[in-house]
Amino acid sequence: MLKQLQARLVAVISWVNRTRPLRVWNRYLRARGPLLAQGLSYQAIFAVFAALWVAFAIAGFVVRGDEALQQAIIDVLNTAIPGLIDTGDGDGAVAVDDLLSASILGWTGAIAAIGLIATALGWLASGRDAVRTIFGLPDSTMNPVLLKLADLATALGLGVIVVLSAAMSIASTSLLSWLFGLGGVDDASTSATIVARVTGILLTFLVDALLLALVYRVLSGIPIPLRILAPGIAVGAAALGVLKLLGSLLLGGASSNPLLASFAVILGLLIWFNLLCQVILIAASWIAESAADAGVNLARRGLPRRGNRDRIRAPRVRPGRSAREYRDA
């Protein structure tokens, strides 16, 4: 009887070890994912303020003239990073007026912009190395200048996605109000509130999926097949959605502690970025395990194409001729 119980226990443990979630977690730990996430979260503190300043300095001319788009962008950013922008309650790290007054005109602004862009691009480079580490790949061998240009394009892509998500939020709100008006439904009714909430969640999921796809497919420089990429970004986007819904609860402890009140905002951002980076790397681990199950070699896909031309190929020996004769010919 005891031997049967032991055999069943061993079988259960063996089955658990073969499940996808546990294999994903083990890969994440073997690649030192928690340590990578801590480093990324520390860099993110500097990078996010740099990116905010540069983005609003460049696009501020357009944002200032459209209050609806301005508020939508602020809402998107506060949803993605709770406690980042102060909306008037004094709990944010950056005031809206300070962002809108940012300017890169003049030598001082230009020099500051260059330094801030370098900081933001440094975080993207670290993020790329972290994702490639989870995939079991070495650092990218692309030309450093081209690599920085690729990081700059990725940063611009991230900014475009944020602006598009804000525009989609405005458009969806207007569309829902129009549809409610056609159906004679009050905007403040329970059903209208539920529909608006579900629509917001779906839009947030779509934006997060696009951002993750940009990180895993473009930033890492690996042509991951869509059939493997899609489930991974779906898992990551869903986890980010849950994280955002629980953001106020997760970060509430920092501001409620009187000993931490003086730097509660920065501490809260550090906690948030750490959780965010861990979700991104765990989702990358999910993609890596999916590729392994499908027999897709991400290491081979991560090699530069021109490296194939640099390989030393062994000479072919024609039938009836020895290798020595071929070498001496």
Image (tube, rainbow, N blue to C red):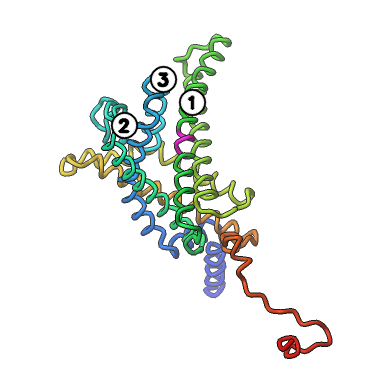
Residue on which the image places disc 2:
105
Residue on which the image places disc 3:
68
Residue on which the image places disc 1:
167
Q: Which one is earlier in the sequence, the residue at label 3 or at label 2?
A: 3
Residue 303 in view in this figure:
yes
Number of callouts in the render? 3
Identify the amino acid type marked 1: Ala
Residue 296 versus residue 19: which sits nearer the camera? 296
Kind of element beneath mark 2:
loop
Q: Residue at x 42, y 23 (%)?
A: 69
Identify the amino acid type marked 3: Ala
Q: Which one is earlier in the sequence, the residue at label 1 or at label 3?
A: 3
What residue range appears in magenta?
158-162
Quadrant containing the N terminus is bottom right
10 left or right, relative to 94: right
Identify the amino acid type marked 2: Leu
Q: Is residue 159 magenta?
A: yes
Q: Is residue 259 above or below residue 67?
A: below
Image location of residue 75, percent across then percent down: 39, 28
